Amino acid sequence: MKIYARIFTLLSFAAASMLMAGCKSEVPGYKDSEPTESSSDYGYLETSSLVMQVIADSDMESYPNSSNRAATTRAEVDTETFLVKIAGSDGSIQFEGTFAELKALSQIELPVGAYEVTVRSDDRDTTPAAAFESPYYTGSKSVTVRKGETSQIGQVTCTLANIKVTVMISADLAEDLTADTQTTVSLDEQSLVFAKDETRAGYFTPTAEKNTLKVQLKGAFADTQEPVQFSKEIANVSAGQWRKLTLVIAHSDEGGISFDIVVESFVQDDEITINGTQGIWEPLYTEEPAIAAPSIEWTDHDLTQPFQLKASMFDGYNCTESFQFHILAPGNIASYQVEITSTNDAYTQWLTSSQVPVPFDLCQIDAAHAAAATLRDFGFPIGDAVKGQTDLTFDLAGAMTPIYKMYGDGTYTFRMTVTDEEQQSTEATLTIKVDRNNESGGTTPSALGIEWAGYDIDQEYPLSADMQIDIKCTAPAGIRSLKVSIISETLDVTEAGLPSTFDLADISDPDLIATLGDEGFGFPINDKVKNQTEVPFSITPFVSLLMNFDGLHKFQLEMTDNEGQTITKTVQLRVTK
């Protein structure tokens, strides 16, 4: 009966919250009069309630010729012409037109259900992929229409969907270059040419989550007419970013001038209410690292996937498969930590007897160290052969011989973390699997998965009383832990003695087992989760409780398998009354 007592406590808390909310002055969701009741399953969407917000920017810069870049203000963003589409969950389009046309309708009658309101600043099908002064804003919001009720759209925030680029030439460099000097910025097949005194911003359509801009300066020195050419790549550029490129003199002597580009990145993250009273957005400055972070590559292999060792990969006692690693660290290697672990206890004991630390730093291991000989046999460089290096190559084939020939079945991991003198770190894990009874196995897939049946688990959804929230967790290597965190804007589950975070694979409290297990919410507990390769469960029993609390409710699911791999997904449910 404890579970019912706790649910009653939560519902009592909900009633108290709603009573307090009832003391406030509320505005009805309709304008002049209540809508006519309909016997069919229809409701109303108040289209005039849409509030458009755009993340805009403003900047004023002084150029070498003393001209100024014109500031972009909120008044220059014409939201009346923005394109709005309202589509049902089945893909049916209920409205498609401009923001002005939608507002003029006041309200529209729609079948009961969930709808997606999407907004675009213009039709990209007729706009060049790269163009000057061509920002493209997009935004969306989910709304729910209930029977006989009037729902409001509310605020839709539009953010920059392309990449903004401006190019400046520093004053001292501009004086040395001819007037026809120009800078070409390219992203894949897109390119824009910036004249020496160009003041406009260029906008590029991203082709991936992370993009690379190519910059090329061509011109001549004003005094000698000697040709000038310089190029550089700007990596990791994303939609919504403003990359301010300034060409500068990096070095100057009697032998000539060398160039460089200073990159300033602005991320637009503050909302501007169009025609409102909020102040103009000031961009947030973040400096790009001057030196690239370290990288770890296993030549001709994918480090993200486990690798199965087989007898065919050995010539007698020696491994013939390439385990060559290539490390690049432009900022000089300061630390190279390695942690070797295994599910094979005999192998772990052998490492201990060989005095191999867990973990160890190759930069700190010298020839006198007790583990030096073992690590060299594995193929690791040590000491000064690692510390301070910028380009390092080694082969770990030697480490595979004892794994396969001496110790056999199990999973072996080599977790490597390289840190440079700029304190930038990169981590990668080599995972080796051995099953000597299955020599045809090849690479074992790592298909960790958390799915919500019938829904995209990465999206937020409006919660309805009949919603089914059925989850399936998949882990071929077996589940080590399955943590559930309940994160809510308005509901505090601890009020009823339920923890906000719990691990379904490791619950010992009898009361909590009763609350979460078959006697309560019906979650699988302990052995029904631990080491299982597939676990289905449902969050549906929480629906009736959550419906009493307005706001966004999240169920964050973090699953780790027996190989140490982790996946995190979050069910996002919004209650709006």
Image (cartoon, grey):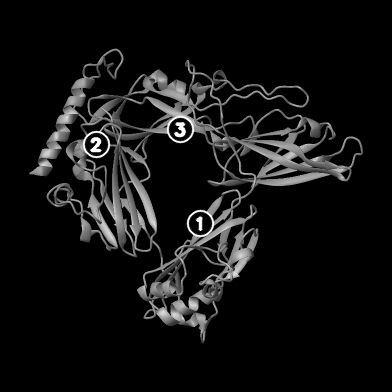
Q: Residue furthest left?
A: 1
- Residue type, label 3: Gly
| Marks 2 and 3, how far apart at CA | 23 Å
**Can the viewer see residue 92 in this picture?**
yes
Q: Residue furthest right?
A: 224
Residue for point 28% across, 16% down? 27
Closer to us: 297 or 506:
506
Q: Residue furthest bottom?
A: 316
Q: Residue furthest top?
A: 32
What residue sits right under mark 2 in the picture?
A: 464
Q: Position of residue 551 (x, y in %)?
A: 29, 31
- Which numbered dot is residue 427? 1
Q: Quadrant of residue 151?
A: top left
Please say if 209 is above or below 489.
below
Residue for point 12% across, 35% down? 8
- Number of numbered discs on residues: 3
Please say if 117 is above or below 420.
above
- Residue type, label 1: Glu
What residue sits right under mark 3 in the picture?
A: 139
Q: Position of residue 153 (x, y in %)?
A: 36, 26
Residue for point 78% across, 24% down? 65
- Residue type, label 2: Ser
Disc 2 crowd, CA 10 A, few/some/many (<14, 14-19, 20+):
some
Disc 3 crowd, CA 10 A, few/some/many (<14, 14-19, 20+):
some
